[in-house]
Amino acid sequence: MKVPFHFDRRLGIQIPALSASWDTYPRDIQEEVLYQWEHSRGHIPERIREIEEEINEKQQRLYEETDFDRSCRLNEQISERASVITDLWIWYRTGENIQVKQRTKN
């Protein structure tokens, strides 16, 4: 079975695309998902820093902007980028408490 991940363009990272409850996946798939997720998850702080830099640049442009309509667009862009950071932090915390199911004794 292929491990279900897809690239989320908005977030800029690979995220799990589970189609069933976690407990329904076999142990080997759970282990592979957690392995891949830890790799993907490790890129989140760097991704957040990149977006924070974008926000800082837009805030500087907003500070200097005199046209109201352009100010509104910049403000909207800043808000959207901040929303991405919030979602990335949620994803970063996802999986901290997920465990691979124990093997059943026969």
Image (cartoon, grey):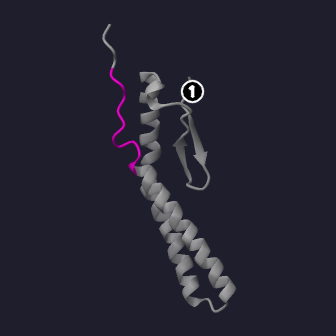
Q: Quadrant of the C terminus?
A: top left
Q: Is residue 89 above or below residue 26?
A: below
Q: Is residue 99 above or below residue 75?
A: above
Bounds of the magenta span?
93-102
94 falls in the magenta region: yes
- Label 1: state its secondary structure: loop
Question: Which residue is found at the position 42% from the left and 51% from the top?
Answer: 92
53 falls in the magenta region: no
Residue type highlighted by circle 1: Lys
Measuring from the top left, give residue 44's x and y in whole percent. Answer: 45, 53
Question: Which residue is found at the position 50% from the left and 76% from the top?
Answer: 56
Q: Quadrant of the N terminus?
A: top right
Measuring from the top left, give residue 66's x and y in whole percent. Answer: 63, 92
Q: Nearer the viewer, residue 21 or 2?
A: 21
Q: Nearer the viewer, residue 73 or 46?
A: 73
How many marks can you see? 1
Q: Is residue 12 above or below residue 5?
A: below
Bin the neighbour count of mark 1 within 10 Å (Cα to Cα): few under 14, some 14-19, many 20 and up: few
Q: Quick one: which residue is furthest to the front in this view?
A: 21
Measuring from the top left, give residue 10's x and y in whole percent. Answer: 60, 56
Quickly name the residue at label 1.
2
Q: Is residue 81 above or below residue 56?
A: above
Q: Nearer the viewer, residue 24 or 81?
A: 24
Q: Quick one: which residue is furthest to the top in this view?
A: 106
Measuring from the top left, give residue 26's x and y in whole percent. Answer: 45, 21
Question: Which residue is found at the position 36% from the left and 25% from the top?
Answer: 101
Q: What kind of secondary structure does the magenta stretch mostly adopt?
A: loop
